[in-house]
């Protein structure tokens, strides 16, 4: 089996045409004609991801966040960013990114997030977009504070921020993994009681929390769950070693 067999399978499930215009989803480094050994799945590509891939004899790394976004003007291997490229090439490891196509695609980041949070009657939130990204659904009536505790448990996050009235009863919940503050207005327009997304700015919360409660679990917690979903998906279709690496504790500490 070749690397391109995995790529073709993933692009059938989550087509590249779903990605945003500014995105850089797809093969980033490597040769899809190489025979596949094993696969490492990670939210981001850092040195630890590469080392874990080497340890598990993986010659394909699948990331959610693209490693290459901006044009590369030189490959000076004394620079930290380029050192990763050098290490990948020397170890013959290919890198494939699944970003906004995975956010939007059926069964992707946001559908998986809705499933984890046990939302029912899940629908698209931003229906004015040609390919919607955010979702909304329903939960049994619960206070915002209790729902926040539920989110902490389900997303295994060490902390989150709840903006708004913590005693407010909620039933209709919107969500978008990653940075989704652009969907707050859509959630308000659809009469959602609460929206869960990350990277909320202070004044965005201040300006909107009178109309809707907001939970920010952090960018990492809102998306990292998808690496385990991808592992399960691939294991159900391919007989090869598939591993995950989580950066949860590799570069930050909570105090």
Image (cartoon, rainbow, N blue to C red):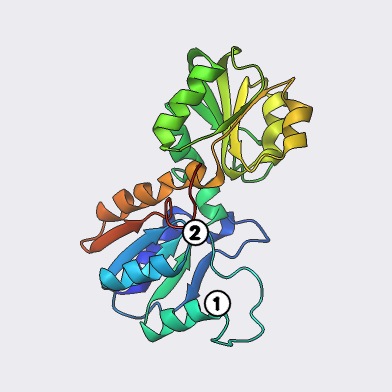
Q: Nearer the viewer, mark 1 or mark 2?
A: 1
Residue depicted at x 73% and y 36%:
202
Q: Residues within 10 Å of mark 1 (few under 14, many from 20)?
A: few
37 sits left or right of 147 in the view: left
Against 241, is 165 above or below? above
Alpha carbon distance from label 1 to label 2: 23 Å
In the image, residue 33 above or below residue 185: below
- Identify which residue, 74 or 103, lies in the foreground: 74
Residue 4 spot, x, y in % from top left: 38, 72
Instruction: Give the residue furthest to the left.
Output: 239
Of the pair 93 and 48, the residue shown nearer to us: 48
Considering every residue shown, the one lying at the far front of the view is 255
Pointer 2 local density, CA inside 10 Å: few below 14, some 14–19, many at least 20:
many
Is 44 placed left or right of 161 in the picture?
left
Residue 98, numbered circle: 2
| Residue 96 occupies quadrant | bottom left
Q: Residue 64 at x, y = what percent?
A: 49, 57
Q: Earlier in the sequence, mark 1 or mark 2?
A: 1
| Residue at left offset 53%, top offset 48% | 103
Residue, disc 1? 80
Identity of the residue drawn at 59% across and 43% down: 133
Q: Do labels 1 and 2 touch, CB within 8 Å?
A: no
Residue 122, x across and y down, in percent: 50, 28
> As drawn, is 116 to the left or to the right of 220?
left
Q: For numbered disc 2, what is the local secondary structure?
A: loop
Q: Can residue 105 be seen? A: no
Q: Which quarter of the figure is the N terminus placed in?
A: bottom left
């Amino acid at each position: 089996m070749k690397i391109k067999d995995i790529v073709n399978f993933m692009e059938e499930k989550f087509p590249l045409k779903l990605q945003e215009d500014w995105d850089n989803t797809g093969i980033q480094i490597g040769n899809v004609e190489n025979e596949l050994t094993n696969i490492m799945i990670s939210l981001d590509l850092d040195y630890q991801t590469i080392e874990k891939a080497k340890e598990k004899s993986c010659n394909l790394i699948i990331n959610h966040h693209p490693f290459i976004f901006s044009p590369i003007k030189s490959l000076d291997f004394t620079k930290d960013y380029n050192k990763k490229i050098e290490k990948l090439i020397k170890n013959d490891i290919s890198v494939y990114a699944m970003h906004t196509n995975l956010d939007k695609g059926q069964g992707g980041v946001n559908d998986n997030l809705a499933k984890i949070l046990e939302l029912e009657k899940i629908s698209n939130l931003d229906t004015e977009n040609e390919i919607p990204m955010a979702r909304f659904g329903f939960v049994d009536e619960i206070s915002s504070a209790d729902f926040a505790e539920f989110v902490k448990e389900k997303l295994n996050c060490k902390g989150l921020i709840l903006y708004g009235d913590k005693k407010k009863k909620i039933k209709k919940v919107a969500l978008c993994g990653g940075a989704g503050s652009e969907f707050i207005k859509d959630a308000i327009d659809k009469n959602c009681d609460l929206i869960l997304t990350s990277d909320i700015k202070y004044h965005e919360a201040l300006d909107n929390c009178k109309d809707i409660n907001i939970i920010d679990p952090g960018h990492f917690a809102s998306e990292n769950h998808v690496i385990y979903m991808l592992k399960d998906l691939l294991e159900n279709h391919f007989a090869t070693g598939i591993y995950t690496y989580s950066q949860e504790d590799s570069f930050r500490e909570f105090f």
